[in-house]
Amino acid sequence: MRTDTFAPLAPWTPTVEAGTPVVDPQDEDVASVPLDYSWDVGSGTWTYATKAQLTRDEEDVWRVTWRRSLLVPDLMDGETLSVERVQAERATVLGAGGAAIVEPRPVVRVGVDKTRVDAAGQDAAARALAAALDMDGDEYAARVAAAGAKAFVEAIVVREGIRRTTCPCSGRSTA
């Protein structure tokens, strides 16, 4: 169970510190022990606490009562952990007097999508786009040639709402 639960978090493994067991005053054969988990996940530390429930058997040996929440609080049977990196939204940058000087806004990325241009036409498309954008055609064509077969090779990022024109390389509208 532990291996299945923590497998998606590899290569990270937790450090676990057990606290002092506390015997239930109502039943001397039942106890609990706090468990403090700490994960060094590269960009920070993830910490949380759980509690193990113990019962004493007929041979006077304390046994842990197994459940998934022993590994992670609120983890239910059938659930596992996963890692997902989520990029934060860009914040507004404020200048003097609290005026926004940089703020998030929609953009259009203009470039060559190598999945939509056959290999024979990619160099010409890159050079035509570079000419339309007043870029170095040799440099941009080299970037397109060096990129993977399924790459989108960005030439420029333009704010939405900018006047659109027709690109001479494809006849399609660009920002």
Image (cartoon, rainbow, N blue to C red):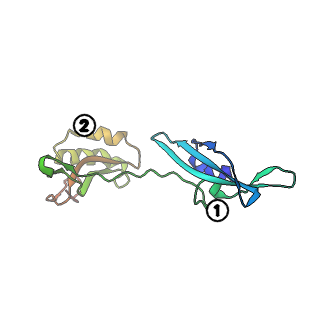
Q: Residues within 10 Å of mark 2 (few under 14, many from 20)?
A: few
Callout 2 touching callout 1 (CB < 8 Å)? no
Q: Is residue 97 left or right of residue 110?
A: left
Identify residue type, mark 2. Asp
The residue at the point 31 percent across, 49 percent down is 121
Q: State the residue in front, 121 or 46.
A: 46
Q: CA distance from mark 2 to mark 1?
A: 55 Å
**Marks 2 and 1: which is nearer the front?**
1
**Image quadrant containing the N terminus:** bottom right
Identify residue type, mark 1. Gly
The single residue placed furthest to the front in the displayed view is 25
Q: Earlier in the sequence, mark 2 or mark 1?
A: 1
Q: Is residue 154 left or right of residue 2?
A: left
The residue at the point 58 percent across, 60 percent down is 74
Question: In the rendered image, which quarter is residue 77 located in?
Answer: bottom right
User: What is the x, y in percent for residue 13?
Assistant: 59, 42
Find residue 138 and name its label. Answer: 2
Q: At numbered mark 2, what does the secondary structure look like: helix, strand or loop? A: helix
User: What is the x, y in percent for residue 96?
Assistant: 12, 46
Find residue 66 and name its label. Answer: none
User: What is the x, y in percent for residue 102?
Assistant: 19, 50
The residue at the point 28 percent across, 41 percent down is 141
Question: Pointer 1: what residue?
Answer: 78
Q: Is residue 63 left or right of residue 116?
A: right
The residue at the point 38 percent across, 48 percent down is 151
**Image quadrant containing the C terminus:** bottom left
Q: In the displayed structure, would residue 104 be above or below residue 11?
A: below
Q: At numbered mark 1, what does the secondary structure look like: helix, strand or loop? A: loop
